Amino acid sequence: MEIAIIGSGLAGLTAARHLTEAGHHVVVLDKGRRPGGRMATRELMGGGRADTGAQFFTVRSAALAESLGLWMEQGLVLEWCRGFTAPDGHPRYAVRGGMAELGAHLASGLDVRQSIRVDRVSRQAGRWRVTWGSGHAGPAGGIDADAVVVTSPVPQTATLLADGAEVPDLTYEATLSLVVSLDGPSSVPTPGGVQLAGDPVWSWVGDNLAKGTSHQPTVTLHSTSALAAARFDEDESTLLDSLRDAARPWLGEARITDAQVQRWRFATPVSPWPERCLEVTSGVILAGDAFGGPRVEGAYLSGAAAAEALS
């Protein structure tokens, strides 16, 4: 069977690997420049690296535990810590060199086509036609498939399937991610991560050097959803200056050598769908963290469920 997957985040790549291993011909299409989706890592001036999206992951299912064992044997994944403010016994896992490295690993050997912005999925002559317009990656084009797995945020999915299926009305909270490189150590306490509750600006602060993402001091700070909702479309320069000032208490005496903002409009699904995936019409399956749950593991399990539904 020929299958098109829209989105090269963890759900899409997991579905693609499972379906390829089952003998199907799979093509993955994604508008981003590199695979991984919200498992994203940025390069900063001075050689620092910072995770801008997912910061770590936990494992509760046997399915992900099996993959975790392989990733750890390969030296790709490491156990970061077992709690932040205080140990709680539950391992948090990070990816050496940044979370994006897991996406690159999963994409290896697959037919993954980046910088393609799919604009429509329509039924034609008994098959599904997936089309996209011209862009910096090349001319407009399209492919035909027997089935389609769509892992993009659900509001975006609704525009792709406007003529072909009824998509559930699921909503998301946004996040603003500030990443900064420093000329000295941060003041983020051991083990290098803090989950905040009640802070007016930040919900998370992470030290990428402590985590093993970077060889240089870099810090990632995630805003609260309330702040992101209020300031998401603010001018870049004004927003960057304000967030940089708000980050100062976590940076110690170090000087900021670079600072960048990443805007995640669909960071966290508010009320995930109760099933791991959803077939909205014959041969079109929706997957992603809005179905598996708002964590790395949820996206992985959703992608696996989508693949099982088509196998």
Image: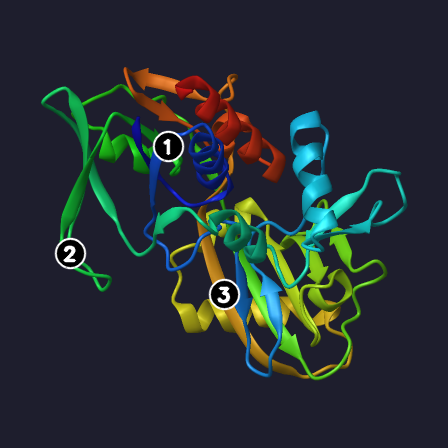
Classify mark 1: residues with Cα within 10 Å, few (<14), some (14-19) or many (20+): many
Residue 207 position in % (x across, y down): 72, 64
Compared to 155, does 209 lie above or below?
A: below
Judging from the image, what secondary structure is the residue with disc 3 in? Answer: strand
Label whose residue precedes the other's in the sequence (3 or 2) = 2
Label whose residue precedes the other's in the sequence (3 or 1) = 1
The dot on residue 134 is 2
Location of residue 178 (image quadrant)? bottom right
Q: Are marks 3 and 1 in contact (CB under 8 Å)?
A: no
Mark 3 and mark 1: Cα distance apart in space: 24 Å
At x 63% / y 76%, what residue is drawn? 181
Question: Is residue 271 visible from the viewing direction of this image?
Answer: no
Mark 3 and mark 2: Cα distance apart in space: 27 Å
Q: Nearer the viewer, mark 2 or mark 1?
A: 2
Q: Are marks 2 and 1 in contact (CB under 8 Å)?
A: no
Which residue in the protein does label 1 denote? Answer: 154
Location of the N terminus by quadrant is top left
Judging from the image, what secondary structure is the residue with disc 2 in? Answer: loop
Which of 198 and 222 lies nearest the eye of the viewer?
222
Identified by mark 2, the residue type is Ser
Location of the C terminus by quadrant is top left
At x 63% / y 60%, what residue is drawn? 221
Mark 2 and mark 1: Cα distance apart in space: 23 Å
